[in-house]
Amino acid sequence: MNFSLNIDAWGVWHFRDSSGDLHDRVVVVRAFPIGAPHQCISILNSEGRELLWFDDLATLSQEQKDSVLQAVTQREFMPEIEKLNAVSSFVAPCTWFVKTNRGEAEFLLKGEEDIRRLSSQTLIVVDAHGVQFLIRELPSMDRHSRKLLDRFL
């Protein structure tokens, strides 16, 4: 695929397609950000019309891949919980103290209904402010984290 995706000093993404046309203020969107984060990605113009679709990041050059990943990471914010350090109580509402892929965090869990199971391994935990935290692989978490989570599931 012949295209370029660049960000300017103001944080605006620009896309140059294979015919050389420049599109300003583009958005890069994953179709399945949790289930298939490196597949089914689209570049949309400022009106939401699709400019380019590709099935897999592996088909792109390293420079293109880096730009696409930077654009989607900038747009999406869903920290992944790597470890559940502690909870203030086993009755909601309670404060969770976690280690995420973006650092240490603490948040208020309003109720057990804010823990949603997407699959047998994947959970989404929504805090009191609506921020979504992802637990990608529940079985791979440490024993202490799983034990604390079991109290809420």
Image (cartoon, helix red, strand yellow):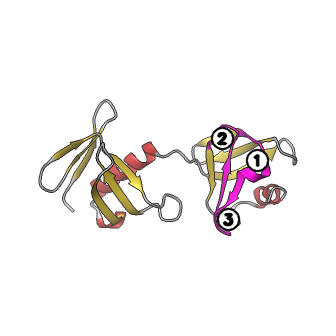
Q: Taking 36 as reference, is 9 left or right? A: left
The magenta segment? 107-131
Earlier in the chain: of badge 2 and badge 3, it is 2
The C terminus lies in which quarter of the figure?
Answer: bottom right
Tag 2: residue type? Glu
Q: Position of residue 111 (x, y in %)?
A: 79, 47
Residue drawn at x 41%, y 49% is 72
Residue at the disc numbered 1 = 85
Residue closer to the observer: 46 or 85: 46
Q: Secondary structure at mark 1?
A: strand
Determine crowd level at label 2: few under 14, some 14-19, many 20+ residues with C-alpha closer than 10 A.
few
Q: Is residue 131 above or below residue 10?
A: below
Q: Are marks 2 and 3 in contact (CB under 8 Å)?
A: no
Q: Position of residue 76 (x, y in %)?
A: 48, 46
Residue at the disc numbered 3 = 140
Q: Position of residue 27 (x, y in %)?
A: 35, 46
Query: Is 127 in the magenta?
Result: yes
Tag 3: residue type? Ser
Q: Secondary structure at mark 2?
A: strand
Residue drawn at x 70%, y 61% is 141
Q: For residue 92, what is the image quadrant?
A: top right
Tag 1: residue type? Asn
- Residue reaching furthest bottom? 120
Tell me the distance, in whole angstroms, between the alpha carbons under discs 3 and 1.
15 Å
